[in-house]
Image (spheres, grey):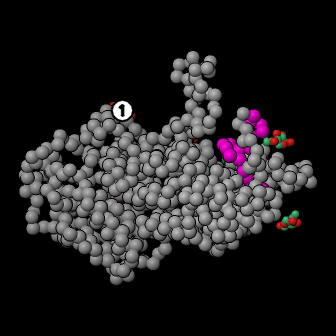
């Protein structure tokens, strides 16, 4: 449906027009007041060093295709959108200078060869003036140029008469606050099909998120086809729920073409049963035990099904080396995530190797056991080359079963205890990726997934007589409540850190554990909440005066949700559509600065 934006916005003064609201908000965007200019067929003129850069050229074609196929009409603006006007007046249109138009994009990239790796320069500037008749983009790297395109494609909108316009003059100077801006996709608990993975990458690119942390396997399934151990894939959910090498390469290439890195995770030694047990059951402890929530002192896992790599059995390390090396040959990122979360001591009672090792020296502890893993496995992980950076969950350093000595160059991903653990890890000199579950876990608040749970049998449960009975609090979800976009955006994760500590915060990532997620709901679980994180880590949650701009994000995010859907990313609705069309009519407080 096309309707005249300038017809409906004709209530505004012509000079106000539509300062469209790209997400993430650029670090610095300044508008003039001359009004919109027509945009004609835009051709890309790139500096000679990148003129035949395939990924860059296809990124431009994609942006231009989105511009011309969508003819985007902002779905939510800061100004009220009056009712649909079937007979738009051409008045605002007539105010435009018919002779002026934008015909081209001039792109200059300083370093066309910079690889897409951690810390690569992603900055760009974008400037449009009527007198130049062009869009001028300057970027240090092609990756920054791609970000400029996703901004530009949001700026060019329908003129309501079959043409395109761009509000001008406009000048943008932009660069991310953090080099690591991610989401985590879990394809171990439920399989996620290739098209759905690519859809998440589309959402990331539009949100300027640059790291897809791919938690590939878990105890429940092993979905990757392997050459060294073809038998591992017997523990895929079905022969169709398998990623071939070609599939993985496709994901990496698709992501790279959108300035998104793919960091694989093979979770070890915990959360390891499927796949590994096919190679040799002896390298996996406790996979046939009862996970035992009902008798907690005997538990072998925090959720079904159990299984941990045997830390003492030597063959474990031969297998780990082969699996890791094969995957290191496919994944192109310098970083590799090797898990290390939630090691459960009870599991190792089922290993004769481990119980004999403890018996040999009664002074040995589970911390000593974790240290054996660090000492034997880390050298294997480092062997992948001098650029390899290893990433682990914080548990290896901060849990009851932590190792004594974790090398300081390992990047730790923090998920417990909010600011406290970020403070602790950075004070110890670790580089940290923030994924605090209280703010950034996207799977929380759905209740438990485990079956045969009598707590839900409210008719026979005497507690059910209590009004709003909620299973002693979180309703069966360990990390309840559901994290809303406002909670995510509001998270000041460097609060009270010293400058030295803050430098160790590389960025943040929103994980989506997939026990209760598959192709059907993955997109609506990630989006548009992950876009709120995208802005938090790109340009922050405060305005130039240092005030929280959560309320200001509202219309930007509501528009962006519609934009994601229009671009094929099945983001969930956040509000009744009434709220999009009546800016701030749905606010909790009338006072727009109530959030501080
Ligand atoms: C934003 O850019 C404008 C124009 O280039 C400049 O005058 C202004 O100081 C910049 N603002 C900030 C906060 O950097
Ligand atoms: C493991 O062994 C220890 C020591 O014997 C015991 O306290 C613990 O309950 C056992 N756990 C399991 C899961 O068997
Ligand atoms: C396991 O390997 C270590 C060296 O890493 C060696 O000292 C030990 O004897 C081996 N154990 C067995 C049972 O082979
Ligand atoms: C950090 O965590 C370690 C390990 O749990 C603990 O020993 C230490 O007291 C903590 N330090 C701070 C400053 O919280
Ligand atoms: C930050 O530190 C101040 C001063 O010690 C303290 O009052 C405040 O509670 C801290 N903020 C957070 C979020 O921990
Ligand atoms: C709006 O909220 C801010 C922050 O709480 C407060 O300082 C200000 O006085 C409020 N304004 C009005 C008009 O209530």
The residue carrying mark 1 is 588
Q: In the displayed structure, would residue 159 be above or below residue 318?
A: above
The quadrant in which residue 458 appears is top right
| Percent of width and height locating residue 442 | 51, 45
| Percent of width and height locating residue 117 | 52, 69
Nearer the observer, 63 or 499: 63
Q: Which residues are magenta?
A: 295-310
Nearer the observer, 33 or 79: 79
Question: Which residue is drawn at the image coordinates 60% and 62% (left, top)?
Answer: 224
**For residue 337, side relative to residue 129 (left or right):** right
Question: Which residue is drawn at the image coordinates 82% and 60% (left, top)?
Answer: 313
Q: In the displayed structure, would residue 571 be above or below residue 475?
A: below
Nearer the observer, 134 or 207: 207
Dominant secondary structure of the magenta stretch? loop
Nearer the observer, 225 or 368: 225
Q: Is residue 439 magenta?
A: no
Is residue 423 among what the camera can see? no
The quadrant in which residue 451 appears is top right
Name the residue at the front extreme.
239
Element marked by disc 1: loop
Question: Which residue is drawn at the image coordinates 48% and 60% (left, top)?
Answer: 194
| Percent of width and height locating residue 93 | 10, 55
**For residue 242, side relative to residue 490 (left or right):** right
Name the residue at the right extreme.
360
Is residue 455 among what the camera can see? yes
């Amino acid at each position: 449906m096309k309707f005249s934006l300038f017809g409906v916005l004709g209530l505004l003064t012509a000079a106000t027009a539509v300062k469209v609201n790209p997400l993430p908000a650029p670090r610095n965007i300044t508008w003039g007041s001359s009004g919109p200019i027509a945009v004609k067929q835009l051709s890309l003129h790139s500096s000679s060093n990148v003129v035949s850069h395939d990924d860059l050229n296809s990124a431009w074609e994609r942006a231009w295709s989105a511009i011309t196929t969508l003819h985007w009409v902002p779905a939510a603006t800061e100004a009220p959108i009056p009712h649909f006007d079937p007979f738009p007046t051409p008045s605002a249109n007539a105010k435009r200078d018919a002779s002026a138009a934008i015909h081209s994009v001039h792109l200059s990239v300083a370093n066309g060869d910079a690889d897409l790796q951690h810390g690569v320069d992603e900055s760009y500037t974008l400037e449009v003036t009527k007198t130049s008749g062009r869009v001028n983009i300057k970027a240090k790297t092609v990756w920054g140029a791609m970000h400029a395109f996703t901004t530009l494609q949001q700026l060019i909108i329908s003129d309501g008469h079959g043409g395109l316009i761009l509000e001008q003059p406009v000048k943008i100077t932009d660069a991310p606050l953090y080099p690591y801006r991610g989401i985590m996709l879990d394809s171990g608990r439920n399989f996620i099909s290739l098209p759905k993975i690519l859809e998440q990458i589309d959402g990331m690119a539009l949100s300027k998120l640059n790291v897809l942390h791919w938690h590939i396997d878990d105890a429940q399934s092993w979905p990757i086809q392997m050459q060294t151990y073809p038998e591992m894939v017997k523990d895929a959910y079905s022969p169709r729920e398998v990623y071939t090498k070609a599939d993985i390469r496709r994901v990496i290439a698709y992501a790279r073409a959108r300035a998104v890195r793919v960091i694989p995770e093979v979770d070890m030694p915990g959360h390891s049963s499927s796949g590994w047990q096919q190679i040799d059951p002896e390298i996996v402890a406790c996979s046939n035990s009862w996970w035992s929530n009902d008798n907690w002192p005997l538990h072998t896992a925090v959720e079904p099904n159990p299984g941990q790599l045997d830390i003492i059995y030597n063959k474990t390390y031969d297998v780990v080396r082969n699996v890791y090396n094969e995957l290191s040959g496919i994944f192109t990122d310098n970083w590799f995530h090797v898990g290390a979360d939630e090691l459960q001591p009870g599991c190792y009672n089922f290993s004769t190797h481990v119980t004999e090792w403890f018996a040999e020296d009664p002074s040995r502890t589970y911390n000593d056991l974790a240290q054996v893993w660090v000492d034997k496995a880390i050298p294997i992980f480092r062997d992948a080359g001098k650029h390899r950076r290893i990433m682990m969950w914080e548990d290896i350093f901060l849990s009851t079963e932590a190792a004594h000595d974790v090398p300081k160059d390992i990047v730790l991903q923090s998920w417990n205890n909010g600011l406290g653990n970020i403070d602790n890890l950075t004070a110890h000199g670790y580089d940290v990726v923030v994924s605090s579950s209280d703010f950034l876990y996207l799977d929380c608040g759905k209740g438990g997934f485990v079956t045969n749970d009598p707590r839900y049998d409210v008719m026979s449960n005497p507690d059910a007589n209590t009004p709003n009975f909620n299973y002693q609090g979180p309703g069966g979800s360990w990390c309840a409540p559901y994290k809303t976009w406002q909670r995510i955006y509001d998270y000041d994760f460097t609060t009270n850190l010293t400058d030295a500590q803050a430098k160790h915060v590389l960025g943040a990532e929103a994980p989506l554990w997939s026990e209760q997620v598959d192709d059907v709901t993955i997109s609506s679980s990630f989006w548009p909440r992950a876009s709120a994180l995208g802005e938090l880590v790109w340009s922050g949650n405060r305005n130039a005066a240092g005030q929280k701009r959560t309320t200001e994000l509202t219309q930007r995010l509501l528009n962006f949700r519609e934009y994601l859907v229009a671009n094929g990313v099945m983001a969930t609705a956040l509000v009744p559509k009434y709220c999009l069309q009546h800016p701030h009519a749905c606010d909790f407080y009338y006072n727009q600065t109530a959030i501080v």
